[in-house]
Each structure stands twice: as C-alpha cells, then as structure tokens.
Amino acid sequence: MNPAQALYSVTELRAIEHAAMSSLPPHALMQRAGMAAAALAIELAKVPEARILAVAGPGNNGGDAIEAASRLCDAGQDVHVLLLAEPAALQGDAAAAYQRACNHGVPFHPATAAAGLFSQSWNLALDGMFGIGLARPITGAMRDAVESINRLECPVLALDIPSGLDADTGTVVGTDGVAVRASHTITFIGDKPGLHTGAARDHAGPVTLASLDIAPSLFPSPRARCNAVASFAQFLNPRRHDSHKGSFGDVIVLGGAHGMTGAPVLGARAAVHCGAGRVFIGFIEPGLLADSGQPELMCRDAQTLDFSHGVVVAGPGMGESREALDQLARALGASTPLLADADALNLIAVEDGLRERIRTRRAPTLLTPHPLEAARLLRCATASVQVDRPAAARELAATFNAVVVLKGSGTVIARPDGEIAINTTGNPALATAGSGDVLAGIGGALLAQGWPAWEAALGAVWLHGAAADRLVQQGTGPIGLTASELIPVVRTLINEMVGRRAGVPS
C-alpha cells in the first residue's frame, strides 16, 4: 500500500508519536509541524506579505499554531496569534514554542481581544485550537471562537484536524457541538479516518499530509486506507482480441416491482456499460418485460431466471412482497456472486432466515447499504451508524461475513477481517434518486468480469464518485444531475484507465 493512502486511529498515532519522540531532540516534532504548516500557509495566502491570524488553544495543537507563527514571522508575514489560554498554563512543547515565538517578536493577543481580531481583514487564518485529543464538545469562549472562524471570509487552514471534529469517526464532537469549517487541513504524522468520512468533507477541505520525517519503521500496518485506483488497478486489463461476450460474465438484476421499474433498468444499464457480457433484468412484477431505451438488455420474469450462473444484483426497486422475498431467498441460495442493495437489504434486515443465508454464503457477497439500511441490518438507530461510520461498516462486514459498502459522504468499504477503505471521490451530485442503483450495476459488472468482491467494491465506489466529479467539473451539476448521466462517464473512465495501463494514448 502507498503510505499516503494509510489511515491511522488516534491510539495508533499516539503510539507512533511516542516512539518517534524517544529518539528525537526535544520539541523536534512540533518544530517540524510548525515548519510544514507555515510553508502551506504561505502558499494558501497567495500574497507576499500576508496578514495571518493564528488561533491557538491551550494544548499541543495550540503549540503547533504558535510554532507556525514563528516561522511565518521569520518569513516576513504579518502574523498575529490569538492565544485562548494563559501563557503560564502552557506546558511542555507548547510552552517552549511560546517562548520561541516571543523571542521572534510574534505579537500575542489575549482571549479578550478576540472580537476585535475577528472583525479585521485577514488573508488566512490558522486553526490550532484543538487537535485529535478532543473528547468533549467545545463550549463557552472556545465555541464563540469556532463560530467566529467560520464567519471569516479568508481561507482557513486547520492544523492536524479541524477543531471540534473527531479524528476517528469524522463526526462533530457532541450532539450539539461545533467544529471549524476549514478550507484546507494539514495533518501531521499520519492521515486520519475522521478527515474523510461523515461530516469531515464539509469541515476539512483538501487534506495535506506532513509525516514529519518519522521513520517508516515506526508505523504499524494500517487497518484503514483511503481508496485509490492503485488498490484495484491490477484488474484494469485490456481485452484480448480473442474474446466473446461469454468472456465477461452475466449479470442478473433482480428487482422491479410495480411502479419501481426504473431502478433495475438503471442498474442493468450501468452493468452493460461497465463491461458485463450479458445483462438480464429479472422483474418481480410479471409482464414488465422491456427496456425500449436499451434493447441490449434481456428482460424476464424473475421466476423464469436461473440464478446458478453469473452474478446476481438483488434489490433495486424490488419491493418487499412475498414474491420478492421468495426470489431473494432463491438468489441467496445460489453458489454465485451476489450484490445486495436497497429492498434486498430491507428484507434481509427483518427476516432471520435470510440473515442466516447471507452469513453462511461461500460465494462472494457484497452489501451496499445507505445509513438507514445499515441501521436496519444492525437493528439500531441511524444516528448510531452515523456517529461512527467506520465502526458500523466493520460490524456489518463481520456480522454478515461480506464486503460492505456503507454509502454516504466518505463511503466506507469494509471486509470481514476489519480492514476498511474510505472513498475520496464523489460530491453532492450523487444525492439523487437512482444513484445507488447505478453503483449496484457497476459493482455487479466488475464481479461478473472476475474481480474479487473487495476490489470490485473499491473500484465501483471510486468510479461512481469519479464520474460525478468529472460531470461537475464539466459544468453538469451538482444540482440537478441525474443518475443515468453517470453511466456513460463511468464507461469513459474505465476505458481511459485501461488504456493508460496498456500504453494506449488517451
């Protein structure tokens, strides 16, 4: 794995930091953090002599901000520090950073000066209030400072993590908590899951990693990563001339109750455009046997289909009728790869027999719930899923012995052994009806072409989000983008990536 993809928990980061400090001169890590933050701050400020406000809290995160201020002052920037602590209360590295900053001539302002400072014009603000150790909601004067930072019209660079955000989960600490909405984050030592999922992408902005030159040998093997093309690139292979439709597998999309035929059609269209050799729709409602817009799809009554070959994508528009339950049970009993989405997940959630069939399947199994469906599967409240998305995804994967895609901002992909990946593509354009059906079809097509369930999940989620990103970059959306618009763009992305691996000019 590329070290830049690795994600570490707070516990792991504390251990890495402790091991590194035992072999370094005093204050070295904070000095390196300050140097890295100052360099990025100068780049973001975009003017030669920028006015920069550093907001420093009482702990080591405040020390990082103070150290950065010293470097900025040395570089000729007009930097001011709002110190939200008594200088005498600073300890250890932070106290040493404060003394160095005073010696460098950095101007400090007490908390009582906050209103006046926040009313001024700045080219950049540094958030150094709270780091990864925050365990309680931000209150009082600190909360006022967070809200004032969020009203600034300049870029905001968060140091390590936006103050108020949980580094492990990506949630804002406290049910009524607040967190800094940074335009950029520079994170130290190792990247954190909480910078990439849940509320994080609305608070962290683009994340820059500064490893502080810690020896790679001090980093444990990570159990979490950022999803990237490198994680599934080995399956992006050019097609042999000596191939045929049978070389690329069959996909059966099982769904389509009365009034919900669009969902399986979207899934099936996605599957055929992503390379499946043949694609069937098995309609739950008898007689719904055509997709006039995509005649390549073979439409059948679900009862007539043989689930013992190919890949089954179960759930889009399936409904929860007795017929839907019977057909899903038949699909779960087949020894073929299966992706369960939407109503298939809702049926599994309430039927103990189906839950057991999922757990005991030996064929590759992929579940793609959104948070409400995940909560039904775990038999808990949706809020319990969202408060710790990585933990919920891991629990689902272990409970059902399946690869799980917990959808949402920063989709979490988990496998039964506890490893997770957090996706970094996608944008709010995906918050539209049918988007999940398209994702299910992409995943089914990759499974049909022989991708293992883990890589199929990683690839499908990355491509789905990247298609939305490209459309927005081209001026389509995010508002009003429709799910069907994603499909041809995913096809383009797949062919571009295969072409690059094969050395074909794009």
Image (cartoon, rainbow, N blue to C red):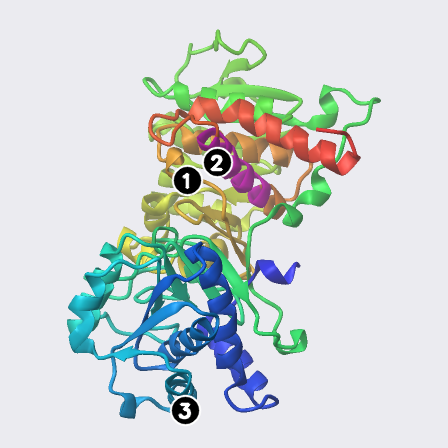
Instruction: Classify 10 Å Cα crowding around label 3: few (below 14), some (14-19), many (20 and above).
Output: few
Assess whether mark 1 and mark 2 are in contact (beta carbons under 8 angstroms): yes
Q: Pick the quarter of the image with the N terminus.
A: bottom right
In the picture of the structure, the residue carrying the numbered disc 1 is 427
Q: Does the segment drawn in magenta span residue 118?
A: no
Q: Amino acid at mark 2?
A: Asp
Quadrant in the picture for residue 384: bottom left
Quadrant in the picture for residue 460: top right
Q: Amino acid at mark 3?
A: Gly
Q: Which residues are magenta?
A: 457-473
Assess whether mark 1 and mark 3 are in contact (beta carbons under 8 angstroms): no
Q: Judge whether 488 appears above or below 337 on screen.
A: above
Q: Which circle's residue, 2 or 1, is located before the other in the chain?
A: 1
Quadrant in the picture for residue 109: bottom left
x%, y% of residue 58? 30, 81
Q: Amino acid at mark 1?
A: Asn
Q: Does the image show residue 306?
A: no
Front residue of 26 and 256: 26
Q: Residue at x 49, y 48 (%)?
A: 424
Q: Is residue 339 left or right of residue 342?
A: right
For label 3, the SS is helix
Q: Residue at x 43, y 56 (%)?
A: 47
In the picture of the structure, the residue carrying the numbered disc 3 is 92
Dot in front, 3 or 1: 3
In the picture of the structure, the residue carrying the numbered disc 2 is 469
Q: Is residue 276 left or right of residue 161?
A: right
Q: Residue at x 45, y 22 (%)?
A: 484
